[in-house]
Amino acid sequence: MHNGSRRQGREMAVKVLFGLFDREQDPDQVLETFWSSFRFGTDVLGEALDEAVKPVKQEVRLFAEQLVLGVASHRQQIDQLLDDFSTNWTLERMSRVDLAILRMAAFELLHHPQTPTNVVINEAVELGKRYGTRETPAFVNGLLDKVARGCRSAD
């Protein structure tokens, strides 16, 4: 899969995870609504547009769905891990955007060992720069670094 496709898939996954947040919704239904409600431009990060331009590439969609469904099915484990490694921050105090990014990246760290740690963290930091606050990139980087050291051997 092309790196741009994976980046776009991660961004779409964060958008869906942001919508799911703490709601008790069926992730499959949320994904179906997401894909049928939005059309995306051709830029690498997949901005939603008012007009249909191009359908999302199948590989992007499949990767995004894999991430969303993975987070949904392992959410308790992921949240416990984030809670264990966060200092002075409970999950309830974290912004929804930060938490969506962290959950997705933690899932990748735990369940996608073929993706290098630095790639997972860098992609999460980039998403934080785009969607979070000024503090998000440093916060995401620091917490994911701790998570990676706690659950992965050195790449």
Image (spheres, rainbow, N blue to C red):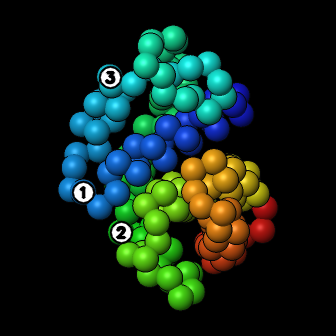
Residue at the (35%, 32%) spot, across then down: 34
Measured from the top left, where is residue 91 in percent x and y? Answer: 42, 75
| Mark positioned earlier in the residue sequence (1 or 2) | 1
| Amino acid type, mark 2 | Gln
Measured from the top left, where is residue 114 in percent x and y? Answer: 67, 49
* Residue 107 visible somewhere in the drawing: no
* Residue closest to the eye, 114 or 140: 140
Query: Which residue in the protein does label 2 denote?
Result: 76
| Amino acid type, mark 1 | Arg
Q: CB atoms at circles 2 and 3 under 8 Å apart? A: no
Measured from the top left, where is residue 132 in percent x and y? Answer: 57, 57
Q: Locate the C terminus by quadrant.
A: bottom right
Disc marking residue 36: 3
Alpha carbon distance from label 1 to label 3: 20 Å
Disc marking residue 59: none
Residue at the (52%, 62%) spot, across then down: 98
| Amino acid type, mark 3 | Ser
Disc marking residue 23: 1
Asked whether, in this view, residue 116 is left or right of residue 151, the answer is right
Under circle 1, the secondary element is: loop
Under circle 2, the secondary element is: helix
* Residue closest to the eye, 74 or 61: 61
| Mark positioned earlier in the residue sequence (1 or 3) | 1
Alpha carbon distance from label 1 to label 2: 14 Å
